[in-house]
Image (tube, grey):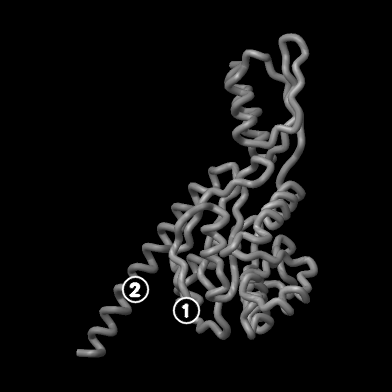
Amino acid sequence: IDRRLIRDRISKIKKQLEQVTRTRELHRKVRRDTPYPVIALVGYTNAGKSTLFNKLTGASVLSMDKLFATLDPTMRTMSLPGGGKAILSDTVGFVSDLPTQLIAAFRATLEEVLEADILLHIRDIAHPDTLAQKNDVENVLRGLFKSDQLPDHLIEVLNKIDMLDEDKYQNLQAGNAMAVSAITGEGVDKLLATIETEMSRRFYTQTAFTLKVEDGKSLAWLHAHGQVMTQEVDGDFVTVTVQMSDENISRFGRIQHVAQD
């Protein structure tokens, strides 16, 4: 009876995981049609990824000290200081020596990492084994990307600085990493600015469009999909300098072409 119950349970979980895979593919298809870059949170289990996700997006995602608390990664839109937007994806926590069967089971989650435009490696800097956890996560990432080098779009985030004692807090050497507290919000503004800078460097182009003054619809579109740097009116025309993704620049060109036709 026990064996039959276990088999039934395994069968049920496999069906749930298949549904997760189908759901993630649908979400990725929708996401590919959006104009925003995707940022994925990765890290050891209980590093505070879901808590930081909630802080950055204002969402309410399950956050607890529990292995694989986040099975189906949640995605939300987040706003950046300059007015830009991105999609933030919370992923399952990594562990050391993850069995092959579990890697297969969580493939749907790990695929989010491979497709992300920016990765945030969230570390529990207050954990006594934080360096070992860092190595475990980096080894998983190298395996995922099939490379000896870590991806160049990875930003390291030292979380839980609020849990450090005074001496460790004062002596914290972050280097190129970002030191934050997802609980108190300390360092989050600086993290957002760093994300925005990296996104601008990697994904955005500054360009100028000249529109008729009365073309409020096109002007509103530029404000909604990019960061307007300058806006100068000259007679019946307005020249708008905007920073946008190449995809949005192409989309705006198509919209203008259709409007002219």
> Residue reaching furthest bottom?
2
Q: Residue at x 61, y 59 (%)?
A: 185
Disc 2 crowd rating (10 Å Cα; few below 14, some 14-19, many 20+) is few
Q: Is residue 246 left or right of residue 43?
A: right
Determine whether the residue tagged by mark 2 lies in a helix, strand or loop. Answer: helix
The kind of residue on which mark 1 rests is: Leu
Determine whether the residue tagged by mark 1 lies in a helix, strand or loop. Answer: helix
Q: Position of residue 231 (x, y in %)?
A: 74, 24
* Front in this rendered view, residue 33 or 201: 201
Q: Position of residue 101 (x, y in %)?
A: 46, 81
Q: Position of residue 51 (x, y in %)?
A: 53, 64
| 104, above or below 247, in the image | below
Q: Residue at x 66, y 28 (%)?
A: 253
Q: Is residue 129 left or right of residue 6?
A: right
> Residue reaching furthest front?
166
Point out the tag, 2 or 1, that comes first from the N-terminus: 2
Q: Position of residue 140 (x, y in %)?
A: 62, 76
| 51, above or below 193, in the image | below
Q: Residue at x 50, y 66 (%)?
A: 109
| 200, above or below 9, in the image | above
Report the number of numbered marks: 2
Q: Quadrant of residue 213?
A: top right
Q: Residue at x 67, y 66 (%)?
A: 157
Q: Are marks 2 and 1 in contact (CB under 8 Å)?
A: no
Q: Quadrant of the C terminus?
A: top right
Q: Quadrant of the N terminus?
A: bottom left
* Front in this rendered view, residue 50 or 40: 50
Q: Which residue is mark 2?
A: 13
User: Residue 84 shows which numbered tag?
Assistant: none
| 155, above or below 209, in the image | below
Q: What distance separates the C-alpha of mark 2 from that of mark 1?
A: 12 Å
Q: Which residue is mark 1?
A: 102
